[in-house]
Amino acid sequence: MKLLHFVQRFVWKIFPTFAINKRVDSYIKNKYHDKIWGGYKLDEQIEENIHIFLTEKELEDKKFLESIKRDIVKSYLLYGVNANEYFTHNFYRKKHKERNRYMSKKRKDELLIRTVGEKWEEAFLTLKDKNKFYQMAKDFFLRNVVSVENKSDLNEFLHFAGKNPKFIAKPSRNSCGQGIKIVDLSVNPPTQVFDDMLKEGTYICEELISQDSRLALFNESSVNTIRVPSIWDGTKACIFYPVLRTGRKGNVVDNAGSGGIFALVDADTGMVISDGYDELGHHFVEHPDSYITYKGFQIPEWDNLKSVVNKIHSTMPKEFKYVGWDFTLSNKGWCVIEANWGDFIMQQKTLDRGLYKEFKQILLK
């Protein structure tokens, strides 16, 4: 078996095109049923995304469709790019040299696993779990928060509810704004709300943020945030391509995955330096609901935000070398919303180029 593995690696190194094509053939033969990075089923992801991004005419062209599917598999094998990233990064228009510059979710995660070492899973799950992250960073929340994880949390929840008859409840382990809701205790009593949340899973409940009017200009129904990717170099936080994220009218969240619009921010000045884009690649010179222009907008209190990012990152364990922070400006100052191993959506349209080499150089210093 070891000899066979050695021979395969030798063949792949000498004949990379042949080897990749053989592996693509294997995926196709298996009807794309293979699981890929992140636990997605390749066939399901391909189907979902071709119906989002391709026209009806393109979907009816069987030859074209098979070539696209084949190219998606090849892109995953060569660059770690999944079906959604393939379209959002415009891979169908790019050659190998350009494609190889992109940092896919898989490439980013592999770099972080390599950097963090054996504690990578603990670090990842801590950031993914909103309740665990709150325990680490509660001093930077600047609002009342309570966990709803088991029945023993009832008394704390009732105390919280007494001060916050209306609050935001977030599933503690969901992402992309899924399951987040505003709870109004005038509709249902606190004990019933508590029991209902426990039946659904675990939650983190937070005092509603009174957002600074300068950020609320874009959209008042959502808390508009700044995604601040931060790499700790041992002495300070290096901010890496921050992004303004704004919600749509009537939405509670601003996540790109929930229809939000993002725009690139200059890390030094806090000036928005791109137009807005959503996750489907739609282009917005101004917010479609509030008509505020993106490019040229100055994020208020930017130097203060950089200082807070430096402070919060300095309190994290050493395995948290990279964190994608979400911050908003409240009437109490910059407060953290959550943190994760954030993906780099700005590679899509705002930059239209990859960041793999830059990220790798800073992370592995």
Image (tube, rainbow, N blue to C red):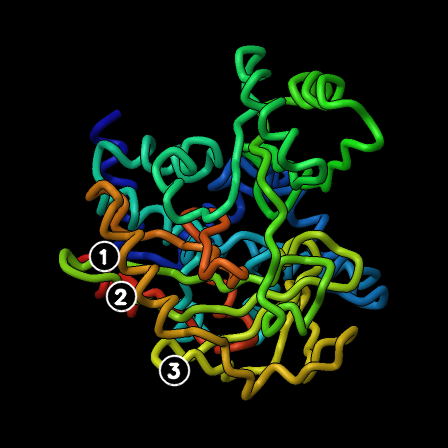
Residue identifier under label 2: 238
Looking at the image, is 127 positioned above or below residue 236? above
Looking at the image, is 353 positioned above or below residue 318? below
Q: On the picture, is 313 further left or further right than 207? A: left
- Give percent across and percent down for residue 44: 67, 41
Query: Of helix, strand and loop, which one carries label 2?
Result: strand
Quick check: marks 1 and 2 in contact, CB under 8 Å?
Answer: yes
* Quadrant in which residue 270 is drawn: bottom left
Q: Is residue 309 visible?
A: yes
Q: Amino acid at mark 3?
A: Thr
Residue identifier under label 3: 269
Q: Cα distance, mark 3 to mark 1? A: 20 Å
* Quadrant in which residue 203 is drawn: top right
- Give percent across and percent down for residue 115: 22, 47
Q: Quadrant of the N terminus?
A: top left
Q: Cα distance, mark 2 to mark 3? A: 14 Å
Residue identifier under label 1: 232
- The residue sitting at 80% across, 58% down in the picture is 250
Q: Nearer the viewer, mark 3 or mark 1?
A: 3
